[in-house]
């Protein structure tokens, strides 16, 4: 998929994310500006009594690699993710999610030729949301957040020329940050998120690619996603 086609796909995704909740929840009355809670007008954060406890989100983005692995991996395709959310407080949430991402590269090493890679991740993250309403009332519609977590990562590489498949699973740690935008108060949101995944696979210390100047396959995995979140 070319860069242009990927860009068009991402634009359509964000347009869809913004349009669907407006149509679905158009009849929901606006929040009263006299509730007394700082964020009640925008619905990004609510009091414990008002805040929904559960939600789910669908997201799309891309995954790339840093370091030597990033020098080898040449092409990034669309990444998809599904997450379930649980708010313990208006500021602190847990999310259980899964994602799949694809990359590819071409190499003459070991006659591998064109290699397609796929990363599947299942993990649990803790997220803390910050409230901007107290800083500036015009920023009440969005909430920045940070996250930390971990989970299982499974990497599969398929060589089309050699008809071989190499699969490996490992545990890793995730850190990240993002912005949550209220589309419909307390009901629908858009989240923009960047995450860095630190995980070591069995080929991390390989010298297989030293002939092309790569002493190992060290490097982290960087994800950028946009998601549509609905609360229950």
Image: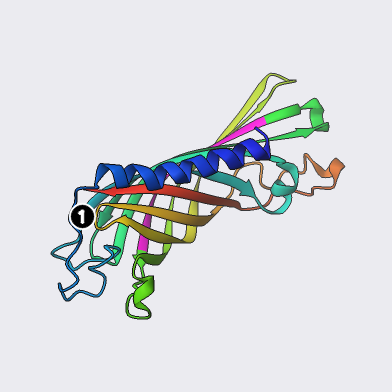
Q: Residue at x 37, y 81 (%)?
A: 135
Asked if residue 35 is positioned above or below residue 160 in the image, the reply reads below
Point out residue 115 in the picture as x, y percentages from the top left corner.
70, 30
Q: 5 left or right of 194? A: right
Tell me where the magenta segment starts and ends, as one range.
Answer: 116-127
The 10 Å Cα crowd at callout 1, few under 14, some 14 to 19, many 20 or more, is: some
Residue at far bottom of view? 135
Taking the spot 13% from the left edge, 64% from the top edge, the residue there is 49
Q: Helix, strand or loop at disc 1?
A: loop
Task: Confirm whether the magenta stretch covers residue 8.
Answer: no
Residue 89 percent location from the top left of the image: 23, 65
Residue at 40 percent of width and 45 percent of height: 17
Which residue in the protein does label 1 denote? 53
Tell me the residue at 24%/47% (across/down).
Answer: 26
Q: Main secondary structure of the magenta part?
A: strand
Q: Position of residue 97 (x, y in %)?
A: 38, 45
């Amino acid at each position: 998929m070319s860069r242009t086609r990927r860009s068009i796909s991402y634009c359509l995704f964000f347009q869809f994310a913004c349009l669907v909740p407006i149509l679905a929840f158009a009849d929901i009355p606006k929040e009263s500006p006299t509730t007394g809670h700082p964020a009640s007008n925008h619905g990004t954060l609510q009091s414990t009594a008002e805040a929904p406890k559960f939600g789910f989100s669908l997201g799309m983005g891309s995954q790339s690699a840093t370091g030597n692995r990033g020098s080898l991996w040449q092409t990034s395709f669309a990444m998809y993710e599904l997450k379930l959310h649980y708010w313990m407080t208006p500021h602190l949430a847990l999310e259980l999610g899964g994602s799949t991402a694809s990359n590819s590269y071409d190499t003459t090493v070991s006659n591998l030729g064109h290699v397609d890679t796929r990363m599947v991740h299942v993990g649990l993250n803790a997220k803390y949301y910050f409230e901007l309403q107290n800083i500036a009332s015009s920023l009440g519609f969005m909430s920045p957040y940070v996250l930390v977590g971990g989970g299982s990562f499974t990497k599969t590489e398929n060589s089309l020329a050699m008809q071989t498949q190499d699969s490996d699973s490992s545990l890793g740690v995730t850190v990240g940050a993002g912005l949550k935008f209220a589309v419909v108060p307390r009901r629908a949101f858009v989240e923009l998120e960047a995450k860095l995944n630190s995980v070591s696979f069995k080929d991390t210390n390989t010298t297989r690619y030293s002939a092309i100047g790569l002493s190992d396959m060290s490097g982290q995995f960087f994800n950028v996603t946009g998601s549509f979140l609905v609360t229950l």
